[in-house]
Image (cartoon, rainbow, N blue to C red):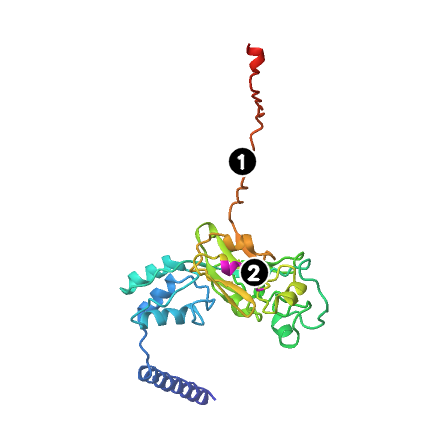
Amino acid sequence: MTVSIIYSVLLLTSLGIIAAIILYLVSKKFYVYEDPLITEVEEILPAANCAGCGSPGCRSFAEKLVGTEDISDLFCPVGGNDVMKSIANLLGKEVAEKDPTVAVLLCQGSCDMRPKTTQFQGPDSCAISALVFSGETDCQYGCLGKGDCVESCLFDAMYMDKETGLPVIITDSCTSCGACVEACPKNIIEMRPKNKRDLKIYVGCMNEDKGGIAKKACAVACIGCSKCFDVCPKDAITMENNLAYIDPYLCTLCRKCVDVCPTHSIIETNFPPKKKKTLPIPSKEKKIKVIVEPLNSNNDA
């Protein structure tokens, strides 16, 4: 009995040693060298794994940064210019500095501006709703209000406003990862440059219907009147499919388009209120009428 136990132990030990040797040889045979710079770059990255850089995660983005000679087109929106400069210094490569961007909602169709005409009874999801339903209002281009964008945000930079039924973007918390842009099936969220003091001017509408139809569906819809296009001094506004679009890189924030928009579909953020022009007050001085009568020659005599 004791001998059989000893044989069993020796057999198992031998099998274990043989397996270890085989695994060691296999690991040496198929060993893949990994540049230690990848780990160093990954430690600099914010570890958000948001895919805003175009890679599925920070690790894969680090591999791309290390393995690419020209990284000027690569950018981590969460880390921003500071993180990219640190990586460039580590790798000895040049990186292009980019202006920070933030998400904006191209829709103002709140409950009071865009009344509901139908009711959707189905999954509480914009993605599913968009597949089978155009929306609960007469505007088929606006926000569906189910909050897919809010759920996709990993940085708590968005929330749903219960009164308006629209998502609200917290600019200071937005990291420009673009997750909300990808999550929106209506394509009404756009990344735009975050200018000084977060000054922005953009058309808050995506309705491509003709003016009368768009205005009936939403009180603040763009009606394609082209008045903003006519007054823009920098050709920053284009008209396509009955809809105006303001190029954020050509716009000089002069606000002339805001003043002429008849439906107030152009949004301006963080601008100081415009000073009211005061007309000159007319003078109240009394005018004295002087009557000069000719002298009578008889009286002079």
Q: Position of residue 18 (x, y in %)?
A: 36, 87
Q: Is residue 29 visible from the viewing direction of this image?
A: yes
Q: Earlier along the polypeptide chain: callout 2 or callout 1?
A: 2
Q: Tell me what residue is drawn at x 52 percent, y 52 percent.
A: 269
Q: Quadrant of residue 69?
A: bottom left
Q: Secondary structure at mark 2?
A: loop
Residue 172 visible? The answer is: no
Q: Residue at the location (57% across, 56% down)? A: 261
Q: Position of residue 263 (x, y in %)?
A: 61, 57
Q: Secondary structure at mark 1?
A: loop
Residue at point 63%, 74% (across, down):
128
- Quarter residue 248 falls in: bottom left
Tell me which amino acid carries mark 2.
Gly
Quadrant of the frame with the C terminus: top right
Q: Characterize the local packing of mark 2: few (<14), some (14-19) or many (20 or more) Cα atoms within 10 angstroms.
A: many
Spatial distance from mark 2 to mark 1, Cα to Cα? 37 Å
Circle 1 residues within 10 Å: few <14, some 14–19, many ≥20: few
Relative to 91, 159 lies left or right? right
Q: Nearer the viewer, residue 41 or 215?
A: 215
Disc on res. 113: none
| Residue highlighted by disc 1 | 280
x, y percent for residue 101: 45, 59
- In the displayed structure, 11 sits above or below 67; it is below
Left or right of 214 in this view: 154: left
Amino acid type of the residue that numbered disc 1 sits on in the rendered structure: Pro
| Depth order, front residue of 230/263 | 230
The magenta stretch spans which residues? 224-230
Q: Of tags 2 and 1, which is closer to the observer? A: 1
Please check the rendered image and state whether residue 162 is part of the magenta-colored stretch, yes or no. no
Residue to which mark 2 is pinned: 204
